[in-house]
Amino acid sequence: MSISDTKKIVPASLVEEILGLKEARRAVLLAHNYQLGEVQDIADFVGDSLELSRQAAATEAEVIVFCGVKFMAETAKILSPEKTVLLPDLQAGCPLCDMATAEEVRARKASLPGVPVVSYVNTTADVKAESDICCTSSNAVKVVESLPQEEILFLPDRNLGSWTAEQTGKRLIIWDGYCITHQRILSEHILGLKEKYPDAEVVVHPECTPEVRRLANAVRSTSGILRYARESSASTIIVGTEIGILHRLKKENPEKVFLAPSALPVCPNMKRITLEKVLWSLEEMVYPIEIPEEIRVPAKRAIDRMLALP
Ligand code: SF4
């Protein structure tokens, strides 16, 4: 099934208002690859978690409006405490994040003395504060390889964890969390499309289950999927991740066909951010993210260790 992206016609006046206010507030708009098409189109930068973290750390803007989910805005605030970081909808959370609490991580660490903790950035600030180093889906392998230890506690995504263990050969103790959106990508959906489009290539996100990953030509982060699409000679590509990425894939590769496995992989939290909410966010300066220093400082250490890797 070919799924169109979520782009819709938006009033020019709404876009003008946002852009005018953005300038007046000296703000920058950062958007994740899973955001609605119209939100991506007005952003100053669109990228994956790692790219967005780097942008947040480097920007000279006074205000960051984060078009993504809460842990991403928290990461921006951890890196740039002097800036105002706004999340246009406070309900835009991440169920995967909520599958590991700081208390649970502390208890697990106590039972594994000497075992370092690698946290996917899809964690709350206080879980990051309990971690030795963070990772994203684009650098998880590099992060795990950078550690001298062979045994590592990896959290919270079991699929990214099993993929990283396969790639590195290290003994990962893997938390039992998962992304509800990527869990909806089923091998039967991929097989059905492959039957219909036998020449199509398959690229999927590492948050997909091992069964789905085994059917793929490549396993990549969202930025990796974008690169794969640019470089592949295939004219049809089946894309196993949240369908918001189709917007950018089609925009950057108008001559190629991109197919989503089904209409199911939609992250309802990512889709909470609308242009209207971005405008209200700039008008009312809502919702500011605040993180206590005793959590921010150790959380920043874990993120900085990741960012320091080449
Ligand atoms: S796509 Fe999955 S991991 Fe990403 S924000 Fe949505 S629920 Fe969380």
Image (cartoon, helix red, strand yellow):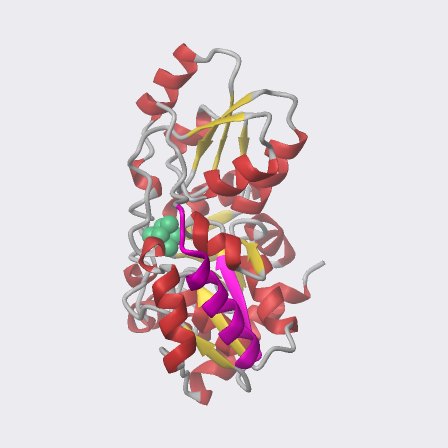
Q: Which residues are magenta?
A: 9-31
Residue located farthest toward the right when viewing the structure as drawn: 310
Whether residue 273 is situated above or below residue 185 in the rendered picture: below
- Looking at the picture, tell me which residue is in the foreground, 67 or 293: 67
- For residue 19: magenta? yes
Judge whether residue 55 can be spotted in this image.
Answer: yes
- For residue 74: magenta? no
Residue drawn at (32%, 43%), measured in percent from left and top? Answer: 266
Residue 49 lies, in percent from the top left, at: 52, 58
Residue 277 found in image quarter: bottom left
Quadrant of image for the C terminus: bottom right
Quadrant of image for the N terminus: top left
Residue 155 found in image quarter: bottom left
- Looking at the picture, tell me which residue is in the foreground, 288 or 297: 288
- Looking at the picture, tell me which residue is in the foreground, 262 or 221: 262
Residue drawn at (49%, 59%), measured in percent from left and top? Answer: 31
Residue 69 lies, in percent from the top left, at: 38, 62
Residue drawn at (49%, 75%), measured in percent from left and top? Answer: 21
Residue 7 lies, in percent from the top left, at: 41, 44
Question: Residue 163 vs residue 141: left or right?
Answer: left
